[in-house]
Each structure stands twice: as structure tokens, then as C-alpha cells.
Image: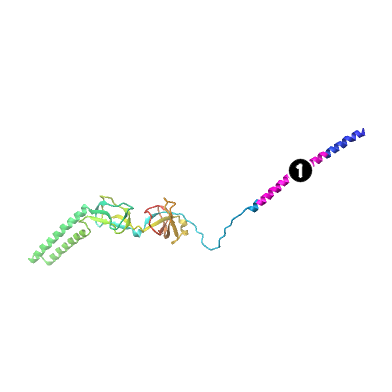
Amino acid sequence: MLSIRIMPVIVAIALAAIVVTAISYNTREGENPISSAAVEQSTSTEQNESETVVFVKTAPLRRGLIAETLMSYGTIVPRTDQIRSFSVPFESVIEKVYVNAGQQVDLNELLLSIAASPDTRLQLEQARIDRAAAHQQEALVQIRLDLKLATRQDLVTTHQLFEQADKKLRNLVRRGVGTKHEIRADAPALVYLINVSQGQIVPAGTNLLNTVPQNQLIVRLGIEPEDLREVQTGQPVQIRPVHVPDAEPLAGQIELLTRALDPQTRLVNVLVKPDRSNGLLLNDYV
């Protein structure tokens, strides 16, 4: 009976040893593949890192300014001191306008034709009548003086009246009241403004038309007041038309900084002188 009882215990112990041995062996077998894969992955990563190439570009050290670009918009306008105004010295009627705003004109090209208004022609006719009457009156006084019926003072008075009437007539004739008047360009230029229309009656001194030389255009930019301290006269500027953004920029430089806000835009006007005016369009937006 004893032997029967001992044998199962011995068999159970042997089976437990076999099971423990198998579990331990399987555990070691499972750890070896994981450890090997990790080692291989680490080795591959180190090889990839060692094969990475980084290119570096060097430059010599130098002292200079860091430029900051300020974007601004404006228009092409004529220089105010180069605008040529055409007017008439007497009340006139605009007979015909031969040009348009923005047109380029040559020297001595016809711009306008005008004539004296009806009131001005009446003044001319009245001046002729007054001169003739004063001349007759002077002749009569001279005859009366010869007859001792007038004094020399009377002759002096009538002579002064004749001179006044004669000067008034000559003045009207010299200003061209009695003839048609043609206004022609006095230099090659662009027509800037036309302030009259055909058939209009204009008083003496009215500004009829303005021209400006092609090479006397300037760029008027508007900048924010807080950016005014960043700009100064002489700074370079690149000018590019807004409607042609890919066009080659035109070089220029700041000529004048104004010290007042534009009442319409609330910006500070800056005048830029372009290096050349060829290709610039009057009133163009840049």
C-alpha cells in the first residue's frame, strides 16, 4: 500500500519538473527572437543616421544695413511748377477744341480756336466810335482856337480825350479782339486738362487748357503717418504700374516729404522722381 501511495507522488513530482522545464525553455526561446530583432533594428537606424548628409553654405562676415520694404500706392501727376496754362485776355467764344486730355502734342500744334464774344466786339466798335468822335472834337476846338473862340485849355482837354479813346482802341486791337485767335502749343507736351467746351463763352483770364512736358511727370505716393519716420529724401524707390504687376520696375528716388495729411486720403503725400518718364502714363495708378 505504501509503495502504491509513493509512486503517484514520485510521478507527480516528475511531471511537475518536466512542465517547469518546458515552460522555462519556451520562455527563453521566445526572448531570443525579440532581442535579436531589436538589435538588428537599432543597428539599421544607426547606419541610416550615419549615411545622412547635410549641406551648409558659408559666407564672409560683413557689416551692412538690413533693408525693410515699404509698400505704398499713388498716381502719376505733373510737376506743379511745370504746368503750362493757356488763357485769353478778353471775353471769348470757344469756336473749336482740337485736342483731348492726355494727348501728346508737338511744337506749334493747334489746340484751340477762339473769337471775341458779342459783348467784346461791341466794346471794340464802341472804342472806334469814341476815338473818331474825340478826333473830330479836337479838330473843332482847334478851329475855334484859331478864331479866338476857345482857349488853349479847351484844346488840351479835347486832346486828352482823344488820346484815351485811341489807347483803348489800340489795346483791344493788340489783344486780338478784332480777329480770330488760335492757341498753339509752345513746346512738345501732354495735354493735362481741358477746362472748356466748344461754343462756351468764357470771361477774360479763364484757364482754358493745361499742358505739361512729357519728362516732367512725378509720382505722388500716400503713406501712413506712422511710417513717415522710416522714409527720407534720396531713398531709392521701385515704381511698378498696378495694372501690370509683372512689369519691370522703374527706378526712382524720394524727392519731397510733405508734412501734412491729405484731407481726402488721410495719408502723407510723398513725391518720387522717376529716373525716366518714358512709358509713364499721366494719372496712372502705381
Near-viewer residue (84 or 240): 240
Q: Position of residue 207 (x, y in %)?
A: 29, 55
Q: Position of residue 196 (x, y in %)?
A: 29, 52
Q: Position of residue 222 (x, y in %)?
A: 42, 55
> Which residues lie in the magenta part?
18-47
Could you tell me which secondary element the residue under label 1 belongs to? helix
Mark 1 residue type: Glu
Near-viewer residue (117 or 25): 25
What secondary structure prevails in the magenta region? helix
**Total tally of numbered discs in the picture:** 1
In this rendering, position of residue 55 left or right of residue 178: right
The answer to which image quadrant residue 128 occupies is: bottom left
Q: Position of residue 209 (x, y in %)?
A: 30, 54
Examine the structure image and report whether residue 23 is included in the region drawn in magenta.
yes
Q: Residue furthest top?
A: 1
Q: Residues within 10 Å of mark 1 (few under 14, many from 20)?
A: few
Instruction: Look at mark 1 in the image and give the residue it sits on.
Output: 29
